[in-house]
Image: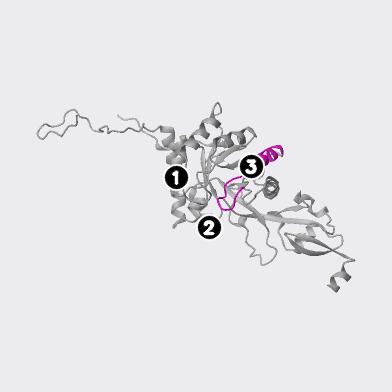
Amino acid sequence: MATEIDSKQYVAEQGTFQVGPFELSSRLIVGSGRYENATMMKECLELSGAQCITVAVRRERLHDADGENLLDFIDSDKYVLLPNTAGCYSADDAVRVARMGREILRALGNPGADWVKLECLGDSKTLLPDPIATLDATEKLVNDGFHVLCYTSDDPVTARRLKAAGAAAVMPAGSPIGSGQGILNPNNIRIILEYLKDEDPDYPVIVDAGVGTASDVAQAMELGVDGVLLNTAIAHARDPHMMAQAMKHATLAGRQAFLAGRIPKRLYATASSPEEGIIATHPYPRGK
Amino acid sequence: MFAKRTSSLSTLIVEVNGEAVELSDGVTLSQLLQQLEITTRHVAVELNLEIIPFEKHAECILVDGDQLEVVTLVGGG
């Protein structure tokens, strides 16, 4: 009699992952920006299965405030909030914004107070990171007690420098933010994984930015990254609800494929059905 | 302009999120936030580049020329 296979066991084996002080149950981290409305955002966060949600820090409106706050739509007891420093073009501004985010989350009692997604941009057209300012800000924030998750390019040397500076996680972009181009240079992601996980296999590497659809997420996960962070790919999909679920499944599928180990690629075919026992009436043409 | 000058003896001007706000002398940060109808639980306040923890808002007395950033969380990636 066949052994019973417990598919739930395999789902569980994709495992939690540790980033700084947090053990996250979902390897998908999603952003809360660019949704048509707050209700849509709330529903998509739920459907994505994510446990960690990124948020931005902006000036409070002094006039014409509509009375609505993001926090009315995100249950801060249920999610770990990850504040970002999006829009900062210098290390000093990024440090200021990180501290503001920490103060808001501390006042809320959200456990996400001491970590930050660091973005130090170098260019408004590409939204590519400024590697020198990012490194500078990382050092300052680590000294200030932050667990720093660094948005960076897919350059392996920069990634290594950020880890050495004390980053809690390095988050290379697959392609420019919001571009939906997917993983443009999987070889760089492979090298980053090799460099950062050498003798430190649990060090978290997260693909942040550029994802366009579910296969991009699966591809990233199959490369062996620990997680994927995305926003626009869900928020601007034609059907955000369905895409949120697709991203959840792709994260799991990619992780399982990575753990399962893919077959090597070959130039020629190998038959799946046995050659032995083929009937002889009309012999198949055989190559030489 | 004249009105502003006459009132300047008992008032001060601070900058909140890039806008000038006129306050009475001795006003605290808590009172400013109340005046602006801002819920303190969802904001952080930076005064002259230093974060003022929410527990200290009530004892923080503002002075003329103070520069404040009052921020909250919004959707972002």
Report whether residue B23 is seen. yes
The one nearer the camera, A127 or A273, is A127
- Amino acid type indicated by mark 1: Asp
In the image as oriented, which residue stretches furthest toward the left?
A281
Residue indicated by mark 3? A134
Chain at tag 2: A
Residue A161 position, x and y percent, is 61, 34
Query: Label 1, on which residue?
Result: A216
Eye-nearest disc, 2 or 1: 1
Residue A34 vertical position relative to residue A105 in the rendered view, above or below:
below
Q: Is residue A146 magenta?
A: no
Rendered view: A161 above or below A57: above
Mark 2 or mark 1: which comes first in sequence?
Answer: 2
Quarter of the figure that contains the C terminus of chain A: top left
Which residue is located at x 77 percent, y 60 percent?
B15
Report helix, strand or loop for mark 2: loop
> Which residue range is magenta in the image?
A121-143
- Quick one: SS at disc 1? helix
Q: Quadrant of residue A5?
A: top left
Marks 1 and 3, Cα distance to the nearest angstrom?
25 Å
Q: Residue A249 got which mark?
A: none
Q: Secondary structure at mark 3?
A: helix
- Inspect this view and state whether residue A201 appears: no
Q: Residue A21: image x %, image y %?
A: 62, 37
| Amino acid type of the residue tagged 2 in the rendering | Tyr
Point 72% across, 63% down: residue: B37
- In the rendered image, which residue does mark 2 sit on? A35
Amino acid at circle 3: Thr
Q: Are marks 2 and 1 in contact (CB under 8 Å)?
A: no
